[in-house]
């Protein structure tokens, strides 16, 4: 369970409680590899991004790499 206070540009704050499940897969050289399960889509991911007070995967937040929009 993840509990935190989030704020926005108007400096208003609100408490957020989110459940972020952890998944595991076998490690390449033994042991286990932990992953986050995105609370938005359930997809297994190594990194979650906070945007708008909620942690989600790159796809749920519609994030792209800067080089995707770069023009040469």
Image (spheres, rainbow, N blue to C red):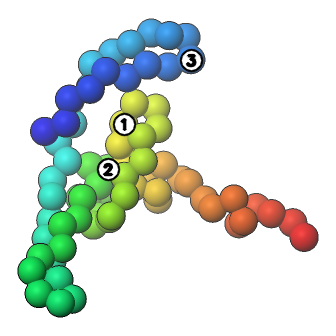
* Label 2: which secondary element: loop
Q: Is residue 28 above or below residue 65?
A: below
CA distance for labels 1 and 2:
9 Å
Disc 3: which residue: 9
Q: Establish if 5 lies above or below 41.
A: above
Q: Which of the two discs, 1 and 2, sits closer to the camera?
A: 1
Q: Is mark 3 on a helix, strand or loop?
A: loop
Which residue is depicted at the point 42% across and 47% down? 49
User: Around disc 3, counting alpha carbons within 10 Å, would you say few (fewer than 14), some (14 to 19), or many (20 or more)?
Assistant: few
Where's residue 57, x and y in %?
Answer: 39, 55
CB under 8 Å between discs 1 and 2: yes
Regarding mark 1 in the picture, which secondary structure is present there?
strand
Residue found 76% across the figure and 61% down from its top: 69
Residue 62 vertical position relative to residue 27 in the rendered view, above or below: above
Side of 63 where 32 appears, left or right: left
Residue located beneath label 2 in the image: 40
Marks 3/2: CA distance? 23 Å
Compare marks 3 and 2 and give the one earlier in the sequence.
3
| Residue furthest left in the image | 31
């Amino acid at each position: 369970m993840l509990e935190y206070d989030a704020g926005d540009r108007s400096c208003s704050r609100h408490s957020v409680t989110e459940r972020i499940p952890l998944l595991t897969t076998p490690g390449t050289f033994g042991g286990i590899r932990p992953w986050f399960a995105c609370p938005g889509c359930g997809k297994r991911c190594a990194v979650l991004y906070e945007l708008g007070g909620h942690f989600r995967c790159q796809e749920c937040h519609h994030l792209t790499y800067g080089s995707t929009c770069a023009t040469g």
